[in-house]
Structure formats: C-alpha cells, structure tokens
Amino acid sequence: MSVNVLRTQDAWWVENDGEATRVPTSATTTAELLADRPALEKARHGSERVPVSGLRPLSPVTAPCRVVAQMVNYRSHARDSGMDPDKVPPTFFRKSSGSVSGPYDPIEVPSHVGLLDYEVEIGLVLGAPLPIGATVTESDLPRLVAGLVVANDVSARDVQLSKGQFYESKSYPTFTPLGPHLTLLDPEDFARLPDLRLTLAVNGQTRQDSTWDDMIVKPARALTLLARFQTLLPGDLLLTGTPGGTALKAPPPLVEKIGALLPPEVKWRTFFARQARNPRYLRPGDRISARVLSGDGRLDLGTQTTTVRAARP
C-alpha cells in the first residue's frame, strides 16, 4: 500500500486521511529519507497525529538533485505539436534543480517572459542508483523507483522557441512546483500506474486531462534509454512528459508551410505576435490546480495549487 510523505521546514511527515505523523528521522534530503525506511515504517503506524491543514508543505524532493525530463511523451501532446505520435523520437532534456519549488508557492514570471505555459506531469523519484549501461524492465521498476510526485513543468515558450533553449526556458526559479507529497510505492502499486489520470485547470477551467496510458515512452524504456548517457541517484527526478492541452500548439499545416517561405526574422515576429493574442498563456493572477489520481482512488498524488505573479526585482 502506498504511503504519502510530506516535507515541512523542520520535519518529514507521513500523511493519512487528512492527518500527519512526524517521521522520527534526522534525514534532511529526500535521498536520506528514502534510506531511513525503519523511521518511515514507524511513522506509518504512529498514533500521534496533527492535522495536515496546519502544515505548510515544501517540495518533497529536495535540491540539489538531477531533474531530467522527457520531451513530447504523450500522444495527445505530439498531435498538438504537429507530430506523428508513432514517429516521435525519445528525447530528454535537463532542468536546473534551482527551479524546484513547493506545491503552494507562487510561480514567479520574469519580466522578459511573455509566453508562460503549464505542463502537468508525473515525476518519478529514484530510490536506487541507475548506472550507465543499465537495462531496465518492468520488474525492475519497484527496485529503482521509490515513488511519484505531481509536477508542473512551467515553460517560457518565447525563450524556448526563439533560442531553441530548453534549459533556460524551463529552469527559472519556481518553474518546477512539486508535491504536495511524495507517494512512496509498494511493489503491488505498480500495477495501478496505467490508471493514473493527470488533470490541470487554470482559474477553474480544465486545460489538460489524460491518463498514463497516453504516454509514448513509459518508464522502464525511458530509464534504459537514459542510462546510455546519464546516471541517476536516489532522490533524483525524472519528469515523464505532459498530455495535450498546453497553451502552445503547432500552427495549421498551411500556415506552417507559408511560414517556412518567410525570412526567419519575419517568421518569428509573425509567430510571436500570433501567440501573444492566445489567451491560454498564463498571466499574473492566474491560479493553477494540478492533480494526479488513480481511477480507484488508491494512488493519490494530491493536488498542487499555485498562483502566477510577477517576479520580484
């Protein structure tokens, strides 16, 4: 049975039915907590509880850590991007762990960013080392993946597209809200992963709604491909992609063909002018709700709620 773990400024907590039990551990990082299983088990059966509503959760994944993400990894997102889902090559990129923030912290948009986008994702938190050259099967996942977390891969699309720069456009502070909790998995929980549903709403309007089954490259294959060039350690994070429904979408084929005939500076100026009129991009004051939950309710990664605001000077 899964266990939901919260982190606050001075403690770790096991959550159960709106109440939380403090974990008796000296761990200060996610990796250290994952290594202290006896303390987690003790808290799991503890009787001294406090209301979760009285706690202020931080990101359950501590930084510094490696944050790796999969690009265009849902069939619906591929179609939105003007791509054939059956022909999308598996692609990874990195985000700075300095972008990690809490589940209720504001998303701060820098003054030079005009096209701010959202991407609800399921994050895999490693519980064991992934060495170079590893081959991962479905049966290996319970040993390698400690748990799951709700993530929002916030993206500055104008930076991403004009520079071809994923790292910068997705790594500004607060651009990776995580939580509210880390859902630690037991081996039998892995059979429920295909039933997970991801939803994201902006100001109460649902923008993204899809399931794990829409994923193109699932975790075992993704970790195998990643291990060709990247090691991961306990506490590191793999973001597994987002469904369709983001603000950014590929232009219609005819528009794209016409754009290809224009000089680059004219094409990009026209494209960004068109995108600036798109009301789906995030603006200061917008409220984002992101949730991941299995259909039977047995795996509940929780709901994170964040508000966009202008970054402070």
Image (cartoon, helix red, strand yellow):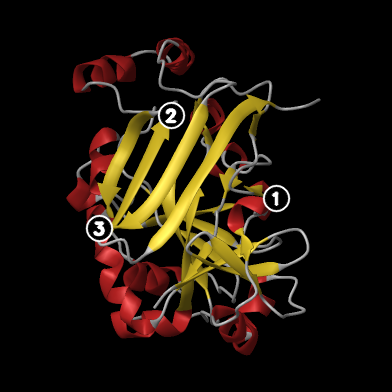
C-alpha distance separating marks 2 and 3: 22 Å
Q: Position of residue 179 (x, y in %)?
A: 54, 54
Mark 3 lies on residue:
295
Neighbor class of circle 3 (other Cα within 10 Å; few <14, some 14-19, many 20+) is some
Q: Secondary structure at mark 2?
A: strand
Residue at horizontal 31%, vertical 61%? 297
Specify whether residue 175 is in view: yes
What residue is at 45 percent from the left and 18 percent from the top?
264
Residue 61 percent location from the top left of the image: 62, 62
The residue that label 1 is drawn on is 98
Mark 1 to mark 3: distance in Å?
A: 33 Å
Is 57 placed left or right of 155 in the picture?
A: right
Out of 262 and 42, give the one closest to the viewer: 42
The answer to whether residue 69 is left or right of residue 224 is right
Look at mark 2 in the image and give the residue it sits on: 202
Q: Amino acid at mark 3?
A: Gly
Q: Nearer the viewer, residue 71 or 20?
A: 20
Q: Nearer the viewer, mark 2 or mark 3?
A: 3
Question: Could you tell me the amino acid type at mark 2?
Answer: Val
Residues at marks 2 and 1, CA–CA distance in whole angstroms: 24 Å
